[in-house]
Image (cartoon, grey):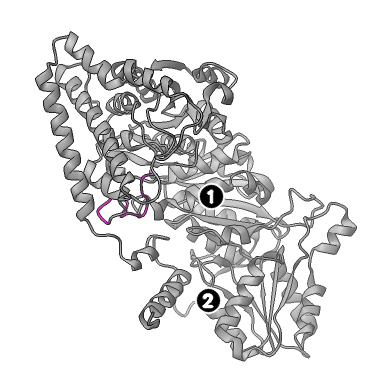
């Protein structure tokens, strides 16, 4: 395509993710989808239409058995399938955490690499739909924490497409986190097939004064905040895309230039992604930091139901804006 | 062809030889563990050899097995070598998993061993998943999920029974009921007498087999395997057996009477029972039995020597095989540790 204009389509996060899954189903007979109501598109219709196209041999409903879904997917992955397990709401990782932590994550290591576990678990995160405490969590930090597991949390349709393809092709287990409030977010996705490697961040907006590392829904909020703070503050916005491995270099290089860091992520703020990114920035660029790094996240509470108090704990553009201002 | 063939005198003798090998392996583990040659802890299966050998011999070469924390017998019966298995227990490079796994984590895909799973119950969904691969890809193998009586109180086991039954997966579930879940006696853990009755809840065939009778185990697993291979779905087998040692080596066993153990050892030792059967049929005499015992002893002597002489993993080996390719995080920490060990001067 040298010299030619690259063909780009504007599509939703959901369509980009579905396109990636469909292409991988076509490309590799070993890819196998399983989950509750997966034959009807699963929660939020991400895989709608794929059962009609590929049938019961490739796309299958499961009983409400997250432990058996992930546990059997590990066995299937170790013997030649590439299962894509939709456990629906990420809160349900609580019922299959053993299978992620002890089976998927440790199999390669404890058996000295004689078994691959090319497994993807899809988990849907995020508040904002008044779905209350057990259907609104953002739990990716507690998965990124596990040895042997890769975790991704794309913030754009392009990243959703490219990371899903890399996740399915990976011979390591990957948990794919998707925020339920950005399925309708539109963005450019090349019509040409491409992948986004696991472990590569994306600078979504260049700036010189402060680095905002923002994930999922908060990427959009951070970009809006950056526009509203300009020209007084020139904000650089980075989507890490992969949580583990994490692209430390891109973040550290940015902090080296700006000297200021804000991390915006919908996890609770203690013991999570915020702390990890701040630590890495401090390890690499301590002497270049001009201000204490700031966290934007959920204030260590479960997500409440009533809109008035859900709004209180969920961070948005104004929280990012204030955090940026606190660094000056 | 099945891995072993108990329909011929040679096959039966080979099964007896394997049971003697398992017994000798674990008896030696008792000694060398007591001498602190083996790190960590070990779970032994003396008394359960007929279940391991009978079931593994009933499988085809391409079949896949998942096991429990008490899996030395199944591993040896599936064809793993005593020397590499012993080396794994010793934590040596020559072990099946380079000393990374130890007694509780042994896998060898070439022999169909998908791994011991010491998270109690985890072997069951794993086996269902292997069977799913066979079904989706149209491959000929079946899976066998070995689990213990204690695991039948765990949720993932029932989820996997249900999933396998609903999807008619080619899998055999084999419960080794040795009467004790760690230190809890069977009737305190379960409100039914026979775990095989659980099969009714999932609409699949169930069967009870005398776990001290290697031929009975072999026959039951052959039948269940045949059903699985014919697309007739899973079977739930319960082998009634008994372990002669504690839950782990060093277990003071406050939960059972010495008399009970002695009675099982005197009356229900699976090796004695099988040897007696073969003797009655005129297929075994004292001389042959002594030869088989001697050859098993020699094989285990060699295995212990092999394990003792093998090298330990190097410090740097701790950092490999976390992922298929190294990730920057682990590499960074590995370099930090290496730099410290060079410059530390301690």
B64 relative to B233 in the view: left or right: left
Q: Which of the numbered marks, if any, corresponds to residue A100?
A: 1
Mark 1 belongs to chain: A
B262 relative to A184 in the view: left or right: left
Foreground: A298 or B97?
B97
Q: How many marks?
A: 2
In the rendered image, residue B163, in percent from the top left (x then y), is placed at 54, 31
Name above or below for residue B285 compared with residue A248: above
In the rendered image, residue B280, in percent from the top left (x then y), is placed at 18, 8
Work out whether residue B106 can be spotted: yes
Query: Residue drawn at (55%, 46%), measured in percent from left and top?
Result: A98
- The residue beneath circle 2 is A5
> Residue B145 is drawn in which quadrant?
top left
- Where are the magenta residues, as a range? B93-103
At mark 2, the secondary structure is loop
Q: CA distance from mark 2 to mark 1?
A: 43 Å
Foreground: A181 or B46?
B46
Sequence order check, earlier mark of 2 and 1:
2
């Amino acid at each position: 395509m040298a010299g030619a204009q690259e063909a780009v389509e504007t599509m939703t996060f959901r369509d980009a993710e579905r396109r990636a899954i469909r292409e991988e189903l076509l490309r590799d007979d070993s890819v196998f989808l399983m989950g509750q109501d997966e034959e009807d598109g699963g929660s939020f219709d991400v895989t709608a239409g794929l059962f009609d196209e590929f049938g019961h041999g490739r796309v299958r409903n499961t009983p409400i058995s997250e432990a058996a879904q992930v546990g059997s997917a590990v066995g299937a992955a170790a013997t030649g399938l590439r299962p894509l397990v939709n456990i629906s709401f990420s809160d349900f990782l609580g019922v299959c955490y053993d299978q992620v932590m002890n089976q998927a994550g440790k199999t390669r290591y404890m058996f000295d690499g004689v078994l691959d576990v090319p497994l993807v678990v899809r988990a849907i995160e995020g508040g904002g739909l008044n779905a209350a405490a057990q259907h609104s969590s953002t739990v990716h930090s507690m998965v990124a924490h596990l040895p042997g597991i890769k975790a991704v949390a794309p913030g754009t349709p392009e990243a959703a497409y490219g990371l899903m393809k890399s996740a399915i092709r990976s011979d390591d287990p990957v948990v794919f986190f998707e925020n339920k409030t950005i399925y309708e977010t539109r963005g450019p996705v090349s019509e040409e097939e491409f992948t986004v490697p696991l472990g590569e961040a994306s600078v979504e907006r260049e700036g010189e004064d402060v680095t905002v590392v923002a994930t999922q829904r908060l990427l959009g909020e951070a970009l809006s905040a950056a526009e509203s703070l300009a020209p007084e503050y020139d904000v650089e916005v980075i989507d890490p895309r992969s949580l583990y491995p994490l692209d430390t270099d891109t973040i550290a290089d940015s902090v080296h230039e700006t000297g200021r860091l804000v991390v915006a992520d919908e996890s609770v703020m203690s013991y999570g992604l915020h702390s990890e990114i701040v630590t890495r920035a401090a390890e690499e660029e301590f002497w270049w930091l001009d201000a204490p790094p700031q966290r934007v996240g959920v204030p260590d509470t479960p997500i409440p139901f009533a809109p008035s108090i859900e709004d209180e704990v969920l961070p948005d553009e104004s929280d990012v804006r204030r955090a940026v201002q606190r660094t000056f | 062809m099945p891995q072993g063939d108990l329909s011929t005198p040679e096959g039966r003798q080979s099964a007896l030889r394997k049971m003697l090998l398992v017994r000798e392996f674990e008896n030696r583990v008792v000694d060398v563990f007591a001498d602190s040659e083996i790190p960590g802890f070990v779970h032994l299966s003396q008394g359960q050899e007929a279940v391991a050998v009978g079931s593994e011999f009933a499988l085809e070469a391409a079949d896949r097995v998942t096991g429990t924390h008490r899996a030395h017998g199944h591993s040896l019966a599936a064809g793993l070598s005593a020397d590499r298995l012993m080396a794994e227990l010793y934590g040596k490079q020559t072990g099946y998993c380079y000393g990374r796994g130890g007694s509780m984590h042994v896998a060898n895909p070439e022999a169909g061993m998908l791994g011991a799973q010491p998270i109690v119950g985890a072997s069951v969904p794993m086996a269902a998943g292997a069977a799913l691969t066979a079904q989706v890809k149209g491959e000929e193998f079946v899976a066998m999920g070995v689990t213990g009586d204690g695991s039948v109180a765990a949720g993932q086991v029932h989820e996997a029974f249900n999933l396998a039954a609903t999807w008619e997966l080619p899998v055999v579930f084999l419960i080794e009921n040795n009467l004790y879940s760690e230190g809890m006696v069977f009737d305190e853990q379960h409100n039914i007498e026979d775990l095989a009755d659980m099969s009714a809840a999932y609409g699949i065939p169930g069967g009870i087999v005398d776990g001290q009778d290697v031929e009975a185990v072999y026959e039951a697993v052959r039948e269940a395997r045949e059903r699985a291979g014919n697309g007739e779905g899973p079977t739930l087998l319960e082998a009634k057996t008994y372990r002669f040692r504690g839950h782990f080596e060093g277990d003071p066993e406050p939960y059972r009477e010495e008399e009970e153990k002695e009675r099982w050892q005197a009356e229900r030792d699976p090796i004695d029972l099988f040897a007696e059967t073969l003797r009655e049929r005129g297929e075994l005499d004292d001389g042959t039995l002594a030869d088989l015992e001697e050859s098993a002893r020699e094989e285990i002597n060699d295995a212990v020597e092999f394990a003792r002489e093998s090298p330990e993993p190097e410090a740097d080996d701790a950092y490999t095989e976390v992922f298929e390719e190294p990730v920057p995080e682990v590499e960074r920490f590995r370099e930090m540790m290496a730099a410290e060990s060079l410059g530390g001067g301690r």
